[in-house]
Image (tube, grey):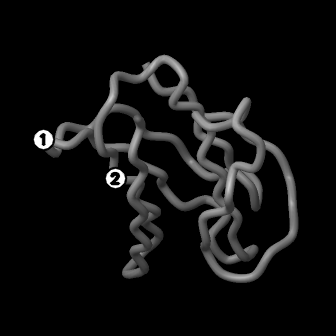
């Protein structure tokens, strides 16, 4: 199971952030501009199956892959015609 955690931050455009120390290796941190608030964040597994979906409530979202199986995941942020996509590999 993949958990989406929400908190606030300030950063420009959508980007993935290095999770830092190894004890946080299963966390994917996403920071966005204000205009992405309200966007849909979707997480897909390597076969393209939608695992979870949530609305971006603040500028920063932390996705916890701690309970997920090993593999490659795709994180998509969709708002109107805007689409940002990131890859996360759980080892």
Q: Which sits in the foreground, 81 or 62?
A: 62
Q: Secondary structure at mark 1?
A: loop
Q: Quadrant of residue 72?
A: top left
Considering depth in this image, is 14 or 91 the residue closer to the camera?
91
Numbered disc 2: secondary structure: strand
Q: How many marks?
A: 2
In the rendered image, residue 6, in percent from the top left (x then y), is placed at 73, 40
Asked which quadrant contains residue 46, the reply is top left
Q: Which residue is mark 2?
A: 74
In this image, 39 relative to 78: left or right?
Answer: right
Residue at mark 1: 47
Quadrant where the N terminus sits is top left
- Separation (CA) of disc 2 from disc 1: 10 Å
The one nearer the camera, 15 or 23, is 23
Q: Position of residue 34 (x, y in %)?
A: 75, 74
Q: Please give left or right for residue 74 compared with residue 48 in the image.
A: right
User: Is 82 left or right of 48, judged from the image as shown?
Assistant: right
Across and down, in percent, residue 42 comes to: 40, 48
Residue 82: percent from the left, percent from the top? 43, 80
* Disc with the residue nearer the chain's start (2 vs 1): 1
Position of 59 relative to 81 (above/below): above
Which residue corresponds to the image point at 59% horizontal and 32% vertical from the top-left? 64
- Residue at screen point 38% across, 58% down: 87
Residue 16 position (above or below residue 66): below
Q: Residue furthest left?
A: 47
In the figure, is residue 40 to the left or right of 69?
A: right
Q: Sort mark 1 into few (<14), some (14-19) or many (20+) by Cα contacts within 10 Å.
A: few
């Amino acid at each position: 199971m993949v958990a989406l955690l929400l908190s606030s931050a300030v950063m420009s455009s959508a980007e993935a952030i290095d999770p830092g120390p190894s004890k946080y290796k299963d966390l994917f941190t996403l920071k966005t501009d204000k205009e992405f608030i309200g966007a849909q964040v979707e997480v897909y597994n390597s076969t393209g199956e939608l695992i979870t979906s949530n609305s971006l409530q603040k500028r920063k979202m932390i996705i916890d892959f701690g309970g997920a199986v090993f593999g490659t995941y795709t994180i998509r942020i969709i708002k109107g015609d805007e689409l940002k996509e990131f890859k996360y590999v759980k080892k």
